[in-house]
Image (cartoon, helix red, strand yellow):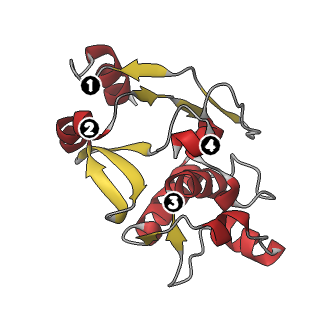
Amino acid sequence: QRKSTQAEFDHIAIILKFENEGIFLFEALEEHGVALTPWQEFLEYAPEYYTKVVFRKLVFNRNEENMKSLKDFAEAAYGKKYSANVKKLLAFEEKKDMEKEAKGELDESKTFFAGELVATAYKVMGILDKEIAAAKYWPSSFEMEKPLAMTNAKLLEEMLIDLTKQSFEASQLIQQG
């Protein structure tokens, strides 16, 4: 995918920290669909699949409403199938569909690819433009060189996670939330 999009990244996930359960990646994977991958499990297999992993902290108003919206969306999306076909990526979305998307209302047949999952989560939290279909967001849309039009939120600079050393600094940042 990186070659066709000429982007630096071909996957994106959200790092979620659960109070008593640890840290997970909320991601859409071709083999598993929408999944919650434990951070330690990711660190074990990641070097086989990824040559570079970066972390960008999301700064936004972490109020009860935002966090509940994210939690409800994650629960509804968990287990949904993966799909990233040309028809979906180029499709025009009806306004009513984008309104449902922004509320996290998912049809039984709803599928996701990585960028779409992250964009929908951001829309559900009210920090990403609701007028642009989530399927229009590729992982490369979240690169530092392509600033997103976010509302009351921003993604901080990219921090490289050295998978060969399981970078202490990045892991500490992630642990802190």
- Image coords of residue 175 (percent x, y): 31, 29
- Image coords of residue 53 (percent x, y): 39, 29
Q: Nearer the viewer, residue 39 or 32?
A: 32
First in sequence: mark 2 vs mark 4: 4
The reply to whether discs 1 and 2 touch (Cβ–Cβ < 8 Å) is yes
Which residue is painted at 51% across and 51% down in the image? 67
Marks 1 and 3 sit apart, C-alpha to C-alpha, by: 24 Å
Question: At numbered mark 4, what does the secondary structure look like: helix, strand or loop?
Answer: helix
Marks 2 and 4 sit apart, C-alpha to C-alpha, by: 22 Å
The reply to whether discs 1 and 4 touch (Cβ–Cβ < 8 Å) is no
Residue 141 position by quadrant: top right
Tell me the residue that label 2 is attached to: 46
Tell me the residue that label 4 is attached to: 5
First in sequence: mark 1 vs mark 4: 4
Question: At numbered mark 2, what does the secondary structure look like: helix, strand or loop?
Answer: helix
Tell me the residue that label 3 is attached to: 113
Marks 1 and 2 sit apart, C-alpha to C-alpha, by: 7 Å
